[in-house]
Image: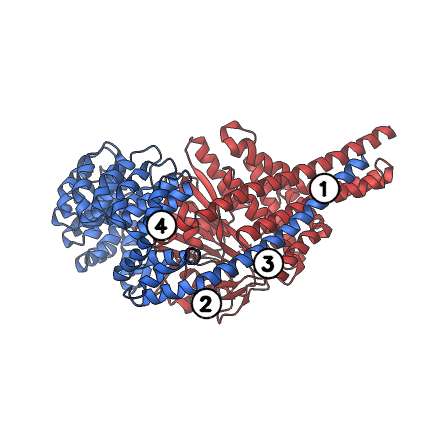
Amino acid sequence: MEQFVLHLLRVADWAVLTYFVALNSSYLALIVLASAEFAKHLRRQSFAGSDDMFRSPLTIAVSVIVPAHNEGPGIVAAVLAMTALRYPRYEIVVVDDGSTDDTFDKLKARFDLREVPRVVPADIPYQSHVLSVHVARGDFGALTVIRKTNGGKADALNVGINLARHPLICMVDADSVLDPDALLSVAKPFGDDPLRVAACGGVVRIANGCKVVGGRVVDVRMPKSWLVRIQVVEYLRAFLMSRTGWSRIGGLVVISGAFGVFRRDLVVRIGGMATDTIGEDAELVVRLHHYLRDRGEDYRVIFVAEPVSWSEAPSSIRVLGHQRRRWHRGIAEILSKHRHMILNPKYGRIGLLALPYYVLFELLAPFVELAALVLLPLGLWAGAVDLAFAWRFALVAYGYGLLVSLVALLIEEVSFHRYPRWTDMLRGVAAAILENFGYRQILAVWQVAGAVAAWHGRQAVWGTMTRTGFDDHDHEPTHLETVGS
Amino acid sequence: MVGVFRLVLVILLGVVLLVGAGIIAVRLLRRARNRRLAALAAGPRRSLLAFVADNGEQGAEDLIAIPEDAWRAALPAARSLLGKLRGEAHAALVSVFLHRGAARAALADLRSRSAVRRARAAQLLGDLELRQAVPELCRLLTDRDHEVRVVAVRSLGRIGDPAAAWRLIASLDLHDPVPSLLATHTLVQLGADAEVTLSAALDHPEARVRAVCLDALGLIGATGAAVRMARVLREDGNLDVRVAAAAGLGRLGTRTAYQPLAAALDPTRPPALRAAAARALGDLGSPVAVPALAARLGDGDFHVAHDAALSLRRLGPDGIAALRARAEAEPGTPAAAHCRESLAHAEVPLTGMAAAR
């Protein structure tokens, strides 16, 4: 019996090592795919036609929808920055989702809002009650502000989609700072391939530490906190590289709610944002795949790597914990809701490749990570593995992870080189090393808690997210206090 | 087993160090390259700016005499200017490019095996607005690479030679056609001389082709095609084409457009067509359309009723009076709600994009 247990421990340790190697190899493969995509993107910049798109009177108009809940400290700066986007025809629809602070009062004062009677189309069902609709009187572009009772972020987006007038909708978080050309870049694929492009995601980068002037990021710097620096490397590897890689092979299933453009008619056809999941942004994309694949339509869901939306990352352990529990809970809920798509040939690459990958390497990864933290010391204690194996095992597992992060930094340096200072580059390398000591492990604990909460069907809570704010050098502060409806 | 692990670790360490060194090397190389290019481009850039500031009257010889490596370094700036300039300054800069052999090289590159080179060459020929390149660019409309085709269409639009109209229209009938909006924009750039070709293409068997031509005719303001467009609105078998015909007729703004558009508001017509006709009557701007639009304020389809109310607002005092009368006569009904919304917009002095909407 004892021998059997020891054998089992040895097998388990090897299985965990194999899993880590496979996991990091998959990351590496996605990074290689992403680098090919970046090279293609950069070679084509000179004839991409962005200026022509900006000048064309026929460029497809966009409704930028901004759900806001208690965003008083930063909402004016955020909306002002959006009015300055370089795009020929767009409107901004801010949905004040039952804020209890001065979000609406600040908007009303700054943009000279006037209440207008609006008939809200019932294209998508929504659960809250629209209190009033306001439009700006001054030259602030086409700004509409909707006041409604609190119903959550997904419900706020559904109201915004109902009132959106244009064929494309762009969902943007109220605390995001967009690059001036961001909307042009993310809407361009719809102009280039209007019959097939159903959705397009833009990259989200971390704004902490960056210099923001007039609602624009003018100087990119590494954040001061090591916790956020590690997230910078993580965003590069897991979001920028990974999503670009998936986009390249037609398997993109996540578009961040912080910055994504969708065809309005398709979103209406599939019933808008789901209010029964906390990961409503990714769920929308998976449902879009589901709908379009069911009908055998030829379509594309793509990701553009540049320019970007800048967002503030959590700088405290508590807030990071909330965020990561929420994210993993979202993954668990989506995979559970759409489980019939997994390994179903009817859904092509989504069903056979992307969703199984998310089960194996996203949903289960923290469980395996925690299992390794238990099994390896246990095997050592029981004598199933010796010390020489144990430390080499750990070095191989984490060393490979470090290599993947460094390759991501190398690709960033070759393609976009957003961090021009030597010190920032060295801090990035140091963060790639440091994330293996404590960060990954605690992340796994939060992620497991998030998945368990989803499976137990506990009430989803966005929670309060205290932010420290950007390094804004403008008169209009963008310092944000809370988010989440 | 420990030996295997040791070997893997040594390899891993080596690769990690290599990648780390790679990051540093890439940065050092890029900085050195940027410095060299900046130094090379500094002189030509000054000359370029002076040339443009002089409206191209002086300094062409200096630009032509710039050594090849320095010109290459300044080329992104020169090409950027080429895309932005108009009039005499543009013509002068084009002549500099021609003297430097850019057009000859670009024409040769149109037959390159590399799609990127073909696309870059097509873009440059469009920026140069070189009419001699039109036949070659038309050939690229059937290129195997989608991006090359798209760049060729854009370039043909910049050149604006109506002779390209038929080839552009034919390219819409391919398996993987260029985007409709891009084709429409290009056809509009070809100008009024393309009207006859566009009008003739309204009988094309492909619905997409007819829809693009209708949009282009409307945007060109081809009043001579109004009767043909009205026929398409009445008779075409494809709903998208009829919607495009309604929108086009609205843009034309001719007296003859009213009757077919009013007929398209009939409740037996599909909602998408009724909504398009309601919008088009607003574009038309004639008070004659007030009764027809007012009759659709109670339409069962949200978008038809909504667009009818918005269009009435655009028809001036008669339209606003009709909105007021309906809002007061039937308070509490959806029609009254649409009227109130439209009236409220009439009272808000919107500017900028909001006004354009």
Rounded to the nearest angstrom, the CA distance separating label 3 from label 1 is 43 Å
- The tint of chain B in the picture is blue
Label ID, residue A106: 2
Give the color of chain A as drawn.
red
Q: Which residue, given by chain and number where applicable, does mark 4 sit on? A: A166
Q: Which residue is mark 3?
A: A465
How far, Cα to Cα, is label 2 from label 4?
26 Å
Front-lying residue, B308 or B326: B308
Q: Earlier in the sequence, mark 3 or mark 4?
A: 4
- Parent chain of label 4: A
Amino acid type, callout 2: Lys
Provide residue A369's location: percent of width, then percent of height: 71, 42
Q: Position of residue A15 (x, y in %)?
A: 73, 34
Going from N to C along the chain, the mark reached first, 2 or 3, is 2
Residue A163 placement, left or right of B271: right
Position of residue B248 measured from the top left corner of the image (x, y, whole percent): 21, 46
Relative to residue B262, is residue A396 drawn left or right? right
Q: Chain of mark 1?
A: B
Q: Which mark is residue B11?
A: 1
Location of the N terminus of chain A (image quadrant): top right
Spatial distance from mark 2 to mark 3, Cα to Cα? 21 Å
Q: Secondary structure at mark 2?
A: helix
Whether the residues at callouts 2 and 4 have beta carbons within 8 Å, the answer is: no
Mark 1–mark 4 Cα distance, whole angstroms, equals 55 Å
- Examine the rendering and report whether any part of residue B273 can be seen: no
Secondary structure at badge 1 equals helix
Rendered image quadrant of residue B243: top left
Labels 2 and 3 positioned on one and the same chain: yes
Amino acid type, mark 4: His
